[in-house]
Image (cartoon, rainbow, N blue to C red):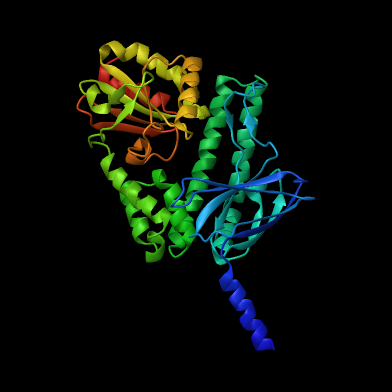
């Protein structure tokens, strides 16, 4: 009977065909829980469950290869910069969890800080929890800094000096977290979490370093969805390295007219990947307006590439509204239209927003920035145009 029970238990384990998450979060009450993840066959999937007295169960019976999902509460934790409900905001962090056909995990913590919750279950999630524990202190610090920044802007108590100080502290905290994650990849080449980290942190590596770290991973993980993403990033990194000719593309402008990057040869071009939803992107627009006004007559052009992550109609509406609100007066195209035929973010290996590339008159890449770049861009334009 004992042998039979053991065999039955093993067969039930093998029969599982989807993930199961059981959770208990203090303060969750009876609110909804959400789970976002991307599979290789579908762009994005959205699952949800209603909690009952702080507890919830979320599951799926769909067979799937390992992916990382983002578990969150519908309790509003977003950082709003003003009382206007339509104003840009910084989304609150969610909890990373590994999902697969054999995932059976328990999540415990608080709804207010779900991103710091504990995960227990299968080896992949245990690895992920180990990473979260290693970065918990710096992640907490970063979140507190973000809350302080949003509060100051909302209450209009921020100054140029206070914004700069908070920005420096956040940059330092992000760098510390990145270092922890890089060390995890180095120390755990046989972990699924390492290929996930390489896929999501590729811009934090020089392309040759990324290629070497990828080479060190277990063969099976290099064949996963994340492995294919890293391989594509390495290829895109080679194509968009400094000194390379920027890959050409054609996308529609605000009037639906196709615009090709190659049509701008003969000018210095700043290619700006942004989105109406992206707070840092839109905060960079006032400075871009100044630079454009100063250097346009000298042969400087800006080509904005809107990346809205919505249906084409919704994307166009959000894009045009943001352009009107920010009074953008330089060239603009939208990536979401015709994205199945040509995805410019994939072509350029874009991982974060805003990302900007400066091209010389021949279309060669001479500078590249991820995030706000005002001082660096000013210095480069002054170097080019002599004032």
Q: Position of residue 96 (x, y in %)?
A: 57, 51
- Residue 275 is at least partly visible in this image: no
Q: Is residue 323 left or right of residue 112?
A: left
**Quadrant in which the C terminus is drawn:** top left
Q: Position of residue 340 (x, y in %)?
A: 37, 39
Report the residue at 34% width, 36% height from top: 344
Image quadrant where residue 358 sits: top left
Report the residue at 63% width, 44% height from top: 140
Report the residue at 36% width, 11% height from top: 293
> Up-down: is 267 above or below 357?
above
> Up-down: is 283 above or below 128?
above
Q: Position of residue 385 (x, y in %)?
A: 26, 17
Point out the residue furthest to the right here: 53
Report the residue at 26% width, 34% height from top: 246
- Residue 130 is at least partly visible in this image: yes
> Up-down: is 321 above or below 342?
above
**Quadrant in which the N terminus is drawn:** bottom right
Tally of numbered tags? 0
Work out whether residue 380 or residue 254 is closer to the camera in this orientation and state it. 254
Q: Position of residue 189 (x, y in %)?
A: 43, 62
Work out whether residue 256 or residue 358 is closer to the camera in this orientation and state it. 256
């Amino acid at each position: 009977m004992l042998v039979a029970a053991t065999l039955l238990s093993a067969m039930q384990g093998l029969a599982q065909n989807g993930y199961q998450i059981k959770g208990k979060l203090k303060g969750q009450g009876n609110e909804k829980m959400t789970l976002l993840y991307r599979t290789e066959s579908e762009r994005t999937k959205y699952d949800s469950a209603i909690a009952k007295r702080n507890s919830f169960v979320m599951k799926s019976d769909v067979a799937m290869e390992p992916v990382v999902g983002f578990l969150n509460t519908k309790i509003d934790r977003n950082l709003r910069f003003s009382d206007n409900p339509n104003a840009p905001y910084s989304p609150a962090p969610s909890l990373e969890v590994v999902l697969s056909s054999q995932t059976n995990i328990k999540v415990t913590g608080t709804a207010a800080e779900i991103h710091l919750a504990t995960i227990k279950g299968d080896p992949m999630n245990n690895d992920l929890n180990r990473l979260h524990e290693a970065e918990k202190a710096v992640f907490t610090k970063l979140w507190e800094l973000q809350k302080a920044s949003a509060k100051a802007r909302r209450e209009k108590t921020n100054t140029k000096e206070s914004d700069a100080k908070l920005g420096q502290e956040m940059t330092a905290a992000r760098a510390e977290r990145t270092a922890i994650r890089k060390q995890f990849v180095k120390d755990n080449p046989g972990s699924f979490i390492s290929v996930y980290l390489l896929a999501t942190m590729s811009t934090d590596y020089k392309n040759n370093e990324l290629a070497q770290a990828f080479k060190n991973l277990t063969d099976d993980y290099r064949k996963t969805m994340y492995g294919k993403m890293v391989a594509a990033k390495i290829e895109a990194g080679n194509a968009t390295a400094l000194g390379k000719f920027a890959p050409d593309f054609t996308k529609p402008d605000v009037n639906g007219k196709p615009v090709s990057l190659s049509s701008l040869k003969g000018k210095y071009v700043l290619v700006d990947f942004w989105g109406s939803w992206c707070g840092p992107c839109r905060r960079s627009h006032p400075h871009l307006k100044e630079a454009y006004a100063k250097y346009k007559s000298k042969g400087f052009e800006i080509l904005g590439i809107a990346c809205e992550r919505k249906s084409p109609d919704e994307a166009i509406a959000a894009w045009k509204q943001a352009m009107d609100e920010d009074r953008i007066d330089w060239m603009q195209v939208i990536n979401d239209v015709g994205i199945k035929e040509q995805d410019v973010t994939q072509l350029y290996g874009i991982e974060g927003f805003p990302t900007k590339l400066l091209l010389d008159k021949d279309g060669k890449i001479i500078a590249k920035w991820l995030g706000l770049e005002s001082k660096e861009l000013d210095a480069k334009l002054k170097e080019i145009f002599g004032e």
